[in-house]
Image (cartoon, coloured by chain):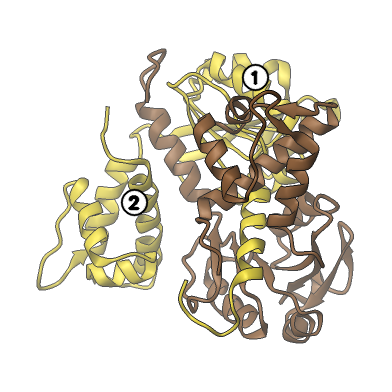
Chain colours: A yellow, B brown
Amino acid sequence: MNSIPEKTIGRLSLYRRLLNRLRAEDKTHLYSYELATLAGGTPARVRRDLMAIGYNGNPAHGYEVEGLIESLGHFLDTPQGQPVVLVGIGNLGRAILSFFTGRRPRLYIVAAFDSDPAKVNRVIHGCRCYPMQELPETVRGKGITVGIICVPAGEAQPVAEQLAAAGVRGILNFAPVRLHLPGNIYVEDMDMTMALEKVAYFAARKPNNVPGK
Amino acid sequence: MNSIPEKTIGRLSLYRRLLNRLRAEDKTHLYSYELATLAGGTPARVRRDLMAIGYNGNPAHGYEVEGLIESLGHFLDTPQGQPVVLVGIGNLGRAILSFFTGRRPRLYIVAAFDSDPAKVNRVIHGCRCYPMQELPETVRGKGITVGIICVPAGEAQPVAEQLAAAGVRGILNFAPVRLHLPGNIYVEDMDMTMALEKVAYFAARKPNNVPGK
């Protein structure tokens, strides 16, 4: 087991994305303070995060962009890639299919499932859609360990249990409900309603034109 | 200024949603341990969170569902409601329009904006779409303080600055990039790529059938 905290993993993923963008702009080196500015943190935290994966910058030139991207890949990715399934082909599910299609070479949605017969047996944004009853066989057969849940709140718990029973070990949950699963299943909630209500709460209470949080 | 931390606000929003579902099932009272189980926390934290808004349960009957929903509403909502604008009418923007339409009576998307002339001057999921150049006037004219950003990473920063300049004080940011804004603007990031990479990382490393995180 790895002892690096969840939040660090999230930031390493962010650093890689920022570095990929810099590489596309032909930048070859950068300092921790530059990465910190882009990522919204402190240079000390950037250095600590990267030291955790065994990467140290050079005091004169900073970090080497190409090499750092490679080290992050070694750390974050599995060599064989990770196929993903998505459950719930509504508006949100479709948007997520389109969002992730072709974005990450090692992390790709290979199948989508829905209980509505009208939504299955076709290809949406390059992804094949199947009826729910084929989920266990597909997930087991392909050795899939990552699932995305986009079904309504009331259906999320049984869907999560089906995924877990078939071998899924990590779930990205867009349903506005907390899932109850064994401790060996990692769940990340993307709760859009909660996020918007938080933003609205602070927007109503932030004094105009007075900086400081 | 209010001193309740961000995470508490998020949980209060979650409690309200859970309570609304219970009310729909005709439940009239519940104990802190029940709410804690649904929300994925401890009873002590539930009691502390609700005490922060001045609400105490009754040792014999627990919390009164109806009264607690009302108290949470007084605390979280502004009496006049909060109109919201959305920028970026791609697949994700459309999914978000559909997701939030008609969901929260006091928090509703009143206008969407896009720089693509082909996407504007029509109604999508009940929301009117306008060209970007009308954003400042609309936001100022309607006194809008909440914005949702769904544009590509490269366009997010200038869009955020336009929103802030027009009076927006809280932003829900779906663009995979960190925004740099004055401290009086509250930003909540919904980074789907980072979330999926985190899930994939832990899914690959969670031992099968061994509970415990």
Q: In the rendered view of the protein, which quadrant contains the N terminus of chain B?
A: bottom right
Crowding around mark 1 (Cα neighbors within 10 Å: few <14, some 14 to 19, many 20+) is many
Tell me the amino acid under the disc marked 2.
Leu
Residue A89 appears anywhere in the view: no
Name the spot of residue B144 as percent of width and height, x first: 74, 75
For the point 48% across and 20% down, the residue is A143
Answer left or right for A201 relative to B139. Answer: left
Q: Which chain is indicated by disc 2?
A: A
Residue A12 — which label?
2
Answer left or right for A32 relative to B164. Answer: left
Tell me the amino acid under the disc marked 1.
Leu
Crowding around mark 2 (Cα neighbors within 10 Å: few <14, some 14 to 19, many 20+) is many
Name the spot of residue A154 as percent of width and height, x first: 75, 28
Q: Is residue A35 above or below residue B67?
A: below
Q: Are marks 2 and 1 in contact (CB under 8 Å)?
A: no
Answer left or right for A170 relative to B87. Answer: left
Q: Secondary structure at mark 1?
A: helix
Sequence-wise, the earlier of marks 2 and 1 is: 2
Q: Which residue was labeled with disc 1?
A: A135
Name the spot of residue B165 as percent of width and height, x first: 62, 85
Camera-nearest residue between B22 and B176: B22
Q: Secondary structure at mark 2?
A: helix
